[in-house]
Image: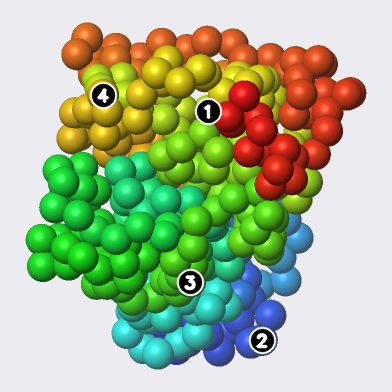
């Protein structure tokens, strides 16, 4: 009996055959393969195996591998009945890993594989997407109601660096909605309290802290070098400063706002020629009293959680280049009716922020704008 007459082979034999030129085909689904493959293997869905073999020109019979060796064994039996001397790897990828054989280079250690296991199974994410997240830098303006859920989920997802910008301290009245903080940390700087919570959740995420108030003169310096910015600001001056800096830096701004029982989310992406900016939505700040703060009007505690979570979702989509971002669209949420509505938000060619006649905002101009 020749070595090719054997239906099942060990992982060690498979590795030896591959070194001699044999092709190892991983016949698991794309979602399964996203969590890791044997080094040198080629991914081919089992349903596409016949078509792949019809196109291939193989000097040796193909080797098949799956998760535990059952699907590859059945596939090898079917191919043998057709005259193709395929061989199945006994024990599949599970045995390959247990045997200490090399995996495809992906820079993921055991902790990352376990921590992000469910995310790695998404074929649109996988090892490559997780690596992109690990390299990402996200600025979070405000470690309060919106910044709390956004930062928690971005850290949990494996974003490599979060820069927290907030000059406030934790107050007991914050705890009803700002879930990064605890009663034991009342009086502590919010960025310090937030760092404790985020490191407890995912010690792999690097946290940079800036216990300063963001304004027109420091916004660009604080936001430079990031991939995007989460707008969790609680005042118009900061929002206009973030918007102006994001336009100058070509940095996507993920906008969120809440009041009482309603909230809204959008994405302002200056990298896209058709994307509006924040000032396409609000060219000028509202008059005093027209837009009361949460401290003045109140807010349902869970509402910032919903909106901040949507902001984190948009951030992950942008970082992974997934789906359709909310650029050019304003998503409105009514918690009492439990209803979402979407409004078109086109770019305004006469916008004072991104239009043809736009002028940059320095500290004095921003102060005049917000007080005018």
Instruction: Check residue 297 in the rendering and tell me which mark sits there, or answer none.
Output: 4
* Disc 2 secondary structure class: loop
Q: Position of residue 149 (x, y in %)?
A: 31, 47
Callout 1–callout 2 Cβ contact below 8 Å:
no
The span from disc 2 to disc 4 (Cα, nearest Å) is: 73 Å
Dot 4 or dot 3, earlier in sequence: 3
Which residue carries the number 3 mark? 208
Give the quadrant of residue 325.
Answer: top right
Q: In this view, does 322 lie to the left or right of 299?
A: right
The span from disc 2 to disc 3 (Cα, nearest Å) is: 49 Å
- The answer to which of 182 and 32 lies nearer the viewer is 182
Residue at 45%, 42% (x, y): give it.
Answer: 233
Residue at 64%, 87% (x, y): give it.
Answer: 19
Note whether 284 is above or below 149 in the view shown.
Answer: above
Give the quadrant of residue 347.
Answer: top right
Dot 1 or dot 2, earlier in sequence: 2
Note whether 47 is above or below 152 in the view shown.
Answer: above
- The answer to which of 53 and 111 lies nearer the viewer is 111
Note whether 5 is above or below 365 in the view shown.
Answer: below
Classify 10 Å Cα crowding around label 2: few (below 14), some (14-19), many (20 and above): few
Which residue carries the number 2 mark? 20
Residue at 66%, 38% (x, y): give it.
Answer: 366
Instruction: Check residue 254 in the rendering and tell me which mark sits there, or answer none.
Output: none
- The answer to which of 185 and 322 lies nearer the viewer is 185
Dot 2 or dot 4, earlier in sequence: 2
């Amino acid at each position: 009996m020749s070595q090719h007459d054997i239906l099942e082979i060990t992982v060690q034999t498979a590795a030896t055959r591959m070194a001699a030129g044999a092709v190892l085909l991983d016949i698991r689904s794309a979602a399964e393969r996203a969590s890791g493959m044997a080094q040198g293997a080629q991914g081919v869905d089992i349903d596409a195996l016949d078509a792949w073999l019809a196109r291939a020109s193989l000097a040796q019979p193909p080797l098949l591998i799956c998760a535990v060796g059952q699907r590859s064994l059945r596939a090898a039996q079917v191919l043998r009945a057709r005259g193709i001397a395929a061989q199945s790897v006994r024990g599949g990828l599970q045995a390959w890993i247990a045997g200490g054989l090399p995996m495809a280079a992906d820079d993921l250690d055991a902790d990352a594989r376990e921590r992000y296991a469910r995310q790695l199974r998404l074929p649109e994410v996988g090892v490559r997407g997780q690596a992109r997240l690990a390299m990402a830098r996200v600025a979070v303006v405000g470690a309060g109601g919106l910044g709390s859920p956004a930062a928690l989920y971005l850290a949990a997802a494996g974003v490599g660096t979060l820069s927290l910008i907030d000059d406030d301290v934790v107050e007991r009245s914050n705890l009803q909605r700002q879930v990064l903080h605890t009663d034991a940390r009342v009086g502590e700087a919010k960025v310090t309290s937030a760092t404790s919570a985020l490191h407890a959740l995912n010690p792999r995420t690097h946290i940079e802290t800036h216990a300063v108030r963001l304004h027109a003169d420091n916004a660009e310096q604080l936001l430079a070098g990031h991939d995007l910015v989460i707008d969790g600001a609680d005042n118009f001056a900061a929002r206009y400063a973030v918007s102006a800096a994001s336009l100058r830096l070509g940095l996507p701004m993920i906008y969120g706002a809440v009041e009482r029982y309603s909230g809204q989310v959008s994405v302002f992406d200056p990298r896209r020629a058709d994307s509006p900016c924040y000032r396409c939505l609000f060219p000028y700040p509202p008059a005093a009293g027209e837009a009361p703060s949460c401290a003045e009007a109140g807010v349902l505690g869970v509402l910032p959680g919903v909106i901040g979570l949507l902001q984190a979702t948009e951030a992950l989509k942008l970082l992974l280049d997934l789906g359709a971002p909310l650029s050019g669209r304003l998503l409105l949420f009514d918690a009492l009716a439990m209803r979402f509505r979407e409004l078109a938000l086109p770019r305004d060619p006469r916008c004072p922020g991104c239009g043809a006649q736009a002028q940059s905002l320095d500290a004095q101009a921003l102060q005049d704008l917000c007080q005018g």
